[in-house]
Structure formats: C-alpha cells, structure tokens
C-alpha cells in the first residue's frame, strides 16, 4: 500500500551535543519540497504501479521519501547506489529526506519507483518549480535566452560490426532463455537454439585487425569479413523467427515476454543488416537520419556541430530556455538535428503562458535567426530582439547589430553557455544514464528540476545575508 510519509521526527534533537542543522540552502530546499503540488504530481504516477497500490498490500516507501531521494540524487550527481549509502550514513540527509530512523530504500527499489515517474510528469514538476521561482521573485521573466546542446546517449562508438555483433549476442541470449521455457514440449532441433556469439567475436577481432591496414587487398578482406558477419546475423534472425513461432503457441507469461523482446530486437537487427549491406557491401552512402547507431538506444541521432575535438556527437539535441535568475523555464528534446530557428515560436508562446507577458529581451545565437522569427518576436511584444543574422550582412544590418543594446543583449546570451556547462558538469546532462527515449526525457527533466530548485534555494538563502549587510 502506498504511503504518503512517515510520522515526523527530529533527529537533531536526539543528539543535541552535535548541534546538527540543515545548512541555509538545504533548509530552503526543504521548504520548497513541502509544496503539495509537487507531491501530488509524483504520487499520481506512483499510485499506478499496480491496480490496488493505493489500498492494498504491505506498506511501501513513502511518496515524500521517494521525491526527496530523487532530488538529492541529482542535486549531488550520485548514482542510485551512492544515494542509498550516503543518505543512510548521514543524519542531516536522513532528516532532509524524511527517512528518519527507518531503513533507506535499496538502490534497486528506488530505481523501480523512479521508472514509474514519466517524463511528462517531470516536465510538469519543472513547470511548478518555475511558478515557485516566480512567486518568490527569483525571476520575473523579463529576459529570455535560448540555446541548444547535446545530451549524449550511453553507447559505445557506433560501427556496423558492433551493432550486428550486439544483435547476434542479444538474440543468442533470448534463444537460450526460450530453450528453457519451451523445454521438451517443442521439437525444433539443436540448430534452432544455436548461439553464434563466438563466431561473431572472432569476426570482430578479424575486422579490427584488417581495418588498420590499407590498400585494395585489405578493403576486399574487409568486405568478405562483413559478408560473413551479415550471413551470421541473418542466420540468427531466421532462428529467432522459428523460435518465436513456437513461443507464440505457449500461454505462460514467460513465453509471451520473450515474444515481446524478440519483436523488439529482430526489426532492429534487420535494419542493421540492411545498413551494413548498403554501406559496406554495396558502397552506398546511407543518410544519417536513416542510420541505426545502437541496438539498445535506437533513438540516438548523429549530430554534427563541428566543435573542436568533437565534430560529431551521438545523442539527442536539447533546447533550453533560460530566464533571469538562472532558471530554466522550459526544455525540449528535439526530434530533428537541424537548426533551432523553427522551434523559437514555441519558446515564445510557452514564455507568454508562464509569465503572462512577452520578455523585454530575447537573445539567441545565429541558429535561431530568421526574418520570420524577428518579426514574430516584435509582434509578440519583445522590445529588444537580439538574434544575429547569418551570412553576409548589409550595411544597415551591421549598424543595427553594432548598437549598444544589441551588444549588451548578445553578452547576456553568452551566459547560457555557462549554464549549459553547469548542467552538464553538476546535474548529469552531459550523458544520459537512463535507457530509451522515455528514459532520456526523465533523465533530462530531473536534472533541470534539481538545478532550478538549487537556484531558488540559493537565492532565498542569500536574502537574509544581504538584508543584514544593508542594515549594518
């Protein structure tokens, strides 16, 4: 049965000699997380775990504890294992997370609860946090700067041989499980359950050695090795089709779960086979938007940003809207990898909905510029539109961009680069550790929510100190 919270306790009163207390920023964060709207949004997702989660069964980890543990995890950029261990060892964090003297949830338990909270819910949490920032006058939405970055997926460097090898390895594992589930009921023969992992491993080693060499002979050997690898992948796919037919006739849940897994993996392996055939065997150039980069993270995209040392990145493009006060008012994972200017109207509309007004200053880089965006921003009521024009500038445009207010706005825009660095370094947005497109949305959302909460808490903690300095 889902519990809301434990009975309140004051752990600091148990050890008065230590004079423990929450530091000012953590105390402010503690007050922010008492917001009932945040609590109810998380509870609404957790209660859907089972049909009778709200009313039956043994007592679960309280909703309040789960919410605070997930915030602490991203606040300090810890893993689930570190969160369990370090919260359990700290009286201060036990008090903050409202665990008190109860056992800290196991890392696997916390992970299962975290996976129930969808990316839409986390986005709604951020909307509520922005409302709190506005009500506490941390921000008023007078300035808006927009930029994009890349959140890398947790994959190895993509090559056709590795993707094919991963596909064969995963199918081999599923075939072994299917053999256990089917037992002696179905006679498919040993060949249907044959694992081809060793063959793939030997070919991968051979490909690695051949790829170092140059010349026509090496290129021909590479094509022959790839042809054998493709044949092995096709043989595994044929085995999977036979075993799937046998599993489909079974009524037990284990067999149906294997059917679902095969239905997910086999189409991806077929795409990898076609991709390797076109690229290596036929010498065809495959467009980047058609490429499969990972069997486990198929939503990964090729993003060419031509940065020094890292011209090509593999992940998803993230658009960030930041208002004054260091608050990320909106974030969006983009489906396309082109320029960002088609997405600026949505940012402006979202800003008007949140702050009931257009920003006085709108700043972005050249990727956001278009004549339509400039006209739209002015029609929306933006007083100063700071979007540098791309290409060759006319004399009038040069004079326009040399004005003092334009230069000041462009310097304001540069600050979002530092914000992106903070999000990547301290809040985990450099690389996503969750799986799938849903996991990417959840991972990015929690990082932004934890960052915004920390910004509000830091701002609130500074106000008494500033008031004391003014009084002195």
Image: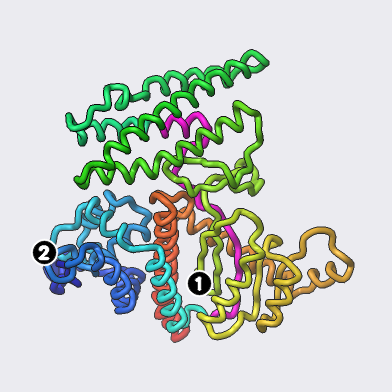
Name which residue lies at 62% across and 17% down. Answer: 220
Query: Where does residue 170 sit, x and y in percent of width and height?
Result: 36, 34
Query: Where does residue 306 sit, x and y in percent of width and height?
Result: 66, 46
Q: What element carries label 2?
A: loop
Q: Which of the labelled discs sits on residue 57, or is there none?
A: 2
**Colour scheme of this structure image?**
rainbow
Q: Is mark 1 on a helix, strand or loop?
A: strand
Residue tagged 1: 329
Residue 12 shows in this picture: no
Name which residue lies at 60% across and 42% down. Answer: 310
Nearer the observer: mark 1 or 2; the answer is 2
Name which residue lies at 39% across and 75% down. Answer: 461
- Find the magenta span and give its range: 141-168
**Image position of 396 (left or right of 339):** right
**Mark 1–mark 2 CB contact (< 8 Å):** no
Query: Where does residue 86 sit, x and y in percent of width and height?
Result: 25, 53
The local crowd at label 1, few if under 14, some if 14 to 19, many if 20 or more residues have their Cα within 10 Å, is many
The one of 254 and 302 positioned closer to us in this rendering: 254
The one of 143 and 154 positioned closer to us in this rendering: 154
106 shown above or below 269: below
């Amino acid at each position: 049965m889902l519990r809301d919270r434990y009975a309140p306790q004051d752990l600091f009163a148990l050890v008065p000699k230590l004079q423990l207390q929450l530091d000012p920023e953590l105390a402010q964060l503690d007050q922010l997380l008492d917001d009932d709207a945040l609590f109810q949004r998380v509870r609404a997702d957790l209660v859907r775990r089972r049909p009778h989660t709200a009313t039956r069964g043994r007592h679960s980890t309280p909703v309040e504890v789960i919410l605070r543990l997930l915030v602490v995890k991203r606040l300090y950029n810890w893993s689930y294992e570190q969160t369990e261990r370090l919260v359990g060892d700290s009286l201060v964090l036990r008090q903050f997370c409202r665990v008190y003297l109860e056992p800290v949830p196991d890392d696997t338990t916390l992970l299962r609860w975290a996976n129930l909270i969808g990316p839409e819910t986390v986005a709604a949490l951020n909307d509520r946090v922005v409302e709190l920032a506005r009500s506490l006058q941390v921000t008023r939405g007078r300035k808006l700067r927009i930029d994009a970055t890349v959140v890398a997926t947790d994959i190895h460097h993509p090559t056709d041989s590795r993707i094919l090898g991963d596909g064969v390895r995963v199918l081999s594992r599923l075939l072994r499980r299917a053999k256990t589930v089917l037992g002696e009921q179905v006679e498919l023969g040993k060949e249907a359950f044959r694992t081809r992992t060793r063959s793939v491993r030997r070919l991968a080693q051979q490909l690695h050695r051949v790829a170092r060499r140059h010349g026509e002979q090496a290129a021909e050997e590479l094509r022959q090795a790839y042809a054998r690898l493709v044949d092995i992948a096709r043989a595994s796919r044929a085995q999977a089709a036979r075993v799937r037919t046998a599993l489909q006739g079974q009524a037990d849940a284990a067999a149906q779960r294997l059917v679902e897994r095969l239905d997910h993996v086999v189409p991806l392996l077929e795409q990898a086979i076609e991709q390797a055939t076109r690229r290596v065997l036929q010498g065809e150039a495959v467009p980047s938007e058609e490429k499969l980069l990972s069997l486990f993270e198929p939503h990964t995209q090729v993003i060419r940003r031509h940065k020094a040392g890292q011209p090509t990145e593999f992940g998803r493009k993230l658009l960030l809207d930041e208002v004054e006060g260091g608050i990320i008012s909106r974030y969006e994972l983009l489906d396309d990898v082109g320029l960002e200017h088609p997405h600026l109207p949505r940012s402006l509309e979202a800003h008007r909905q949140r702050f009931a007004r257009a920003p006085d200053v709108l700043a972005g880089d050249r990727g956001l510029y278009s004549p339509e965006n400039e006209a739209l921003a002015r029609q929306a009521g933006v007083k100063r539109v700071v979007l540098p024009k791309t290409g060759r500038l006319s004399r009038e445009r040069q004079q326009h961009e040399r004005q003092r207010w334009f230069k000041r706005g462009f310097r304001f825009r540069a600050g979002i680069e530092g914000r992106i660095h903070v999000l990547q370094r301290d809040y985990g947005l450099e690389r996503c550790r969750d799986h799938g497109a849903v996991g990417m949305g959840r991972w990015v959302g929690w990082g932004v929510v934890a960052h915004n909460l920390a910004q509000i808490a830091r701002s609130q903690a500074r106000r008494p100190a500033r008031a004391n300095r003014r009084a002195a």
